[in-house]
Amino acid sequence: QVQVVESGGGSVQPGGSLSLSCAASGFTSGYYAIGWFRQALGKEREVVACLSNIDSTTGFADSVKGRFTIARDNNKSAVILRMNNLKPEDTATYYCAARPGRCTAVLSSFRADYWGKGTPVTVSS
């Protein structure tokens, strides 16, 4: 049984930074991908970052490119989404999700099979 649990999030002022952590367990091999999605109030859910566990290749949405990073933390067996230079428009509930395989070449095509419960991020002065 695959489980995905995210943690982190909270409130920060514009220009600040936050880190979100995602722990995925239950995969029988290392061939899976972790994606971070977000959904703002009244908007559709969008994928913002993805990491292929097999080789740590990554992908980012244009809206976060250059500000967000995604990487494995092997000590914690987790994937960390580091969000820098946060903007009010980054305010959303962030979800970690996983699927067997790799991130898609076109990030917006990434679909996940297993989901965390979500964690809120608020960027406000």
Image (cartoon, rainbow, N blue to C red):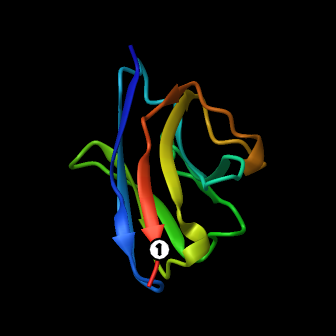
User: Can you name the residue that lies furthest to the front here?
Assistant: 42
Q: In the image, residue 97 lies at what x, y percent? A: 51, 37
State whether residue 111 is above or below residue 2: below
State whether residue 16 is above or below residue 89: below
- The residue sitting at 36% across, 69% down in the picture is 11
Give the camera-side residue of 85 and 29: 85
Quarter assignment of residue 41: bottom right
Pointer 1 residue: 123
User: Can you name the residue that lies furthest to the left here?
Assistant: 75
Q: In the image, residue 6 lies at what x, y percent? A: 36, 43
**Disc 1, SS:** strand
Q: In the image, residue 31 lies at what x, y percent? A: 51, 29
Q: Quadrant of the C terminus?
A: bottom left
- The residue sitting at 59% across, 77% down in the picture is 66
Give the camera-side residue of 26 and 96: 96
Amino acid type assigned to the residue bearing label 1 in the image: Val
- The residue sitting at 51% across, 46% down in the picture is 55
Q: Quadrant of the N terminus?
A: top left
Asked whether, in this view, residue 109 is left or right of residue 41, the answer is right
Q: In the image, residue 108 lies at what x, y percent? A: 75, 48
Give the camera-side residue of 1 and 6: 6
State whether residue 61 is above or below residue 3: below
Q: Residues within 10 Å of mark 1 (few under 14, many from 20)?
A: many
